[in-house]
Image (cartoon, rainbow, N blue to C red):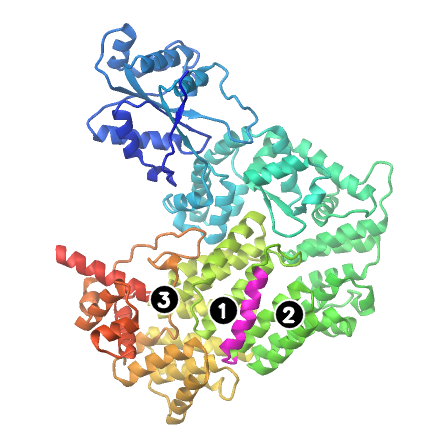
Amino acid sequence: MREGLSWAWPEPLIGADRDAGALAVSVLAGTTVLVAGARGSGRSHLLRTVVKEIASRGVAPVVVRPSSVLSEIPFGALDAVGDSRLMDLRRGHPREEGTVVVVDDVQTLDEESAHFLARCVADGRLVLLGSLLIPRARARRVDLDGSGVSRTMLSLWLDGLAERLDLSEMTATDAEKLLTVLPGASTLDAAISGAVLWRADGSRTLLRELVAEAVTAVAAGQDPFAALRDTSPHSRLSVALRLHTADLAEGDQECLAFLDRVPHVAFSVATRFLSPSRLEAMITAGLVHSDETPARRLTANEALARESERQLGSARIDALVTAAGTRMLADDGEWWSAPLAVTIAQRWHRGDDVAPVGVSVSPGLRARVALDAARLANDRGDAAHAAAHAARGLRWQESPDLRVEAAFALTLLGGDGEGTGLESVDPGDLDDEARGRLVRMRAVIEDRVLTTVLFAATRGDADAEIEGHLDEASRAGSAFAWSSAVDAAERALALSGERTATHLRARLSAGLAETFLGRWAAAREHFQDVERLLDTRQRPMDIGATQRLGAILVLVAGHHLAGADGGPLLSRLAGERTTAAREQDPIALLLAGAAAALSDLHLGAASHALLEWEAVRARSTRALSGPDAALIELALAEALAASGDPVQGRAVMSRVETGDDVLSRHTRASAEATLLMAEGRADEARALARTAADLTIAREVPPVRMRNLFRLLVLGILTPEEDTELRALLAETDLPLAADLARRLHAWDAGDVHQITENLRLHAPWTSDAAADGTRVGRLSPFPAPSTPVADSSFRELTRREREIARLVEQGHTNRDIAELLFLSVRTVESHVYQARAKVGAASRAELGRMVTHWEQRESRA
């Protein structure tokens, strides 16, 4: 027997990119090929593409379409084709060599057809191109062929009569690239894109159907997450999931369904009920996600888990969860799992008691279950369920920790804090988590009677003191007292010690405060420490996806405020967003969407940012509300106006409700001034710009003050004293913003820029490799930007010098190189680049070079 041959195929990423042309040439040269792959690997798509390539070369292949209906009929598949070439071959009539027969899913052929085709390949009467379904690594059955047809076809390869091309399942990169070309996928926001990629499990078929379902939901104004969770049993997506999941062994299906019922359970807890080797294998296969904390918290692929439960029956999974909960309660606190406790509490809420037969569960244990459930509900903004769980727990046992959760939930529901029982709480009776949570409530209930009770209950406690300092820093910042904010944040840092999550928040607070003070070197030290914490190889237990993405959100805001290029943060954002999608953390995904929206804003893609933010608003309850959300919306309205879309900017502005603190009032006045400038209402813009500037007089906010004064300059109302102040600020601070504004001020003094509309954007757009060609970063994959061609007239407005500099930029020259080549100053080159970008709408220096070079090439061909 000759040794089978395998191709080291230059692995393409998606079906359309696989080298169908090379495969067609090989087949036409007389090579029989079996394309093997698991379900969803793209076998059928590749074969269809190769058939088109063969036809384009003037050859009409015989296309056989086997089916289960014909598989029991001798020669059923071949007779159904009705092609004279096959009929002549069966009758033994001589045919010219090189007849090409294409069979998708050869394993579904009837035995007679399979044996006949194999004999014809062996004696050289035809060339076969066939696709063969093979099982995945975790498949329930190793042999998917009961009739022996697959073995017949594989024998051609083993005997050296055919070559075998194995198609791998999609990698993460493959999936992202395929996502960019699927119809409607560009309408999906970052959160649902990440969820779709995770659920696809390496299957092109699943990815296509998941995207179609999500796109349909978005078009209908529905929640795409809900659409993916609750699909019709006979929908295309459900059928694809059923076929995909049916391959899995029952043990794997049980494992997926159980983990879906108890999300984020620790590995050590899961192995009390599931095989450790099975769990490890499923993690390796990508069916289960394990976070990077020492606890290794597990999350199952939700789509596959729910389909697995549908196939196994809910009663079977109910029994598994009941057994797990019973065992935990029976062990009377010897070991504990908060996710399992939440599952038990949810069943109690529905009236289903989970308790060991013949064992009495203590009131204290029941209260502990209720506490875990109440905390999770409060964290997710579900105050009604939090109140219900807390009330149930308090009926079983008086608990100061439960009092905290009950008070928080009732306050969110509109209560006034009376009757919560917090006034009798002794701080020494609270656990570590409750003390921190108690103080953080102040952000929600600051003007209510409960505030005094809260701080009376936590006075003197170390954790509460740290939280108090961080709260003080936040309030000082809102009043533009940033020196006080730095002092408060530094006090929190000094006390945070080994409290990793608290240390992270204190570093972020200090870094942002230093940025507002115009001390970028000091701010960068804090931010770099934050990045080191985020890059820790083994994640700290108290820093999860929510904390990491919240940190990135602050880093993004800090870089914008400083006028620094935050492009390098985008790869970090994409990685954390992928993790949040796998861990199915709803709050983290909201934060990811907010960070994506801000990033798109700073890259000059305001319309993309609007899509991301609208998705965040549609899904958030209380998670992203209040002053932070208002500030993001004001930034969005201002960016929309600056990008030439004041109508959308006005629509966003009209729904924003801001507070009375100085930060909120200033941000609103500043955004409104930009919007009025874009609308051509210069006199009103001047009044609002003056209001914003007056709010920063004698305040510790150099980056804000510089922006305000430059806007006054553009609007023609800058006083001589303010002009002196602006130039002094630009010279004193180390913020990157100062260097950018200095260049623009130089251009203004030189008379190069005197149009108000050319100065709406008061900071330079970020640059990013991911977005260098106009792509969108508010995604897990680089979606092409919507086609918005620049009018030829815009390019013709460029001066000869501007076009010359743009060509040199495209050739890779720096501004200093260009200055030396053209005998100009660096500042003059920078001014020309800025002017040219404004004329053609280039988001970056590199994009300007590409756009101008492409236009000139097109003009030369015309």
- Which label was assigned to residue 443? 2
Element type at mark 3 = helix
57 horizontally vs 313: left or right: left
Q: Earlier in the sequence, mark 2 or mark 3?
A: 2
Element type at mark 1 = helix
Q: Answer whether residue 525 is magenta in the image.
A: yes
How far is disc 2 from disc 3 in space, using C-alphas?
33 Å
Q: Please provide the residue range marked out in magenta.
A: 517-534
Judge by depth and name the residue closer to the eye, 69 or 630. 69
Q: Answer whether residue 768 is magenta in the image.
A: no
* Count of numbered badges drawn on the protein: 3
Residue 205 falls in image quadrant: top left
In the rendered view, tell whether residue 434 sits above or below residue 693. above
Q: Residue 381: image x %, image y %?
A: 63, 58
| Amino acid beneath label 1 | Ala
In the rendered view, tell whether residue 207 sits above or below residue 316. below
Q: Residue 450: image x %, image y %?
A: 73, 71
In the rendered view, tell whether residue 395 sits above or below residue 445. above
- Residue under numbered circle 3: 647
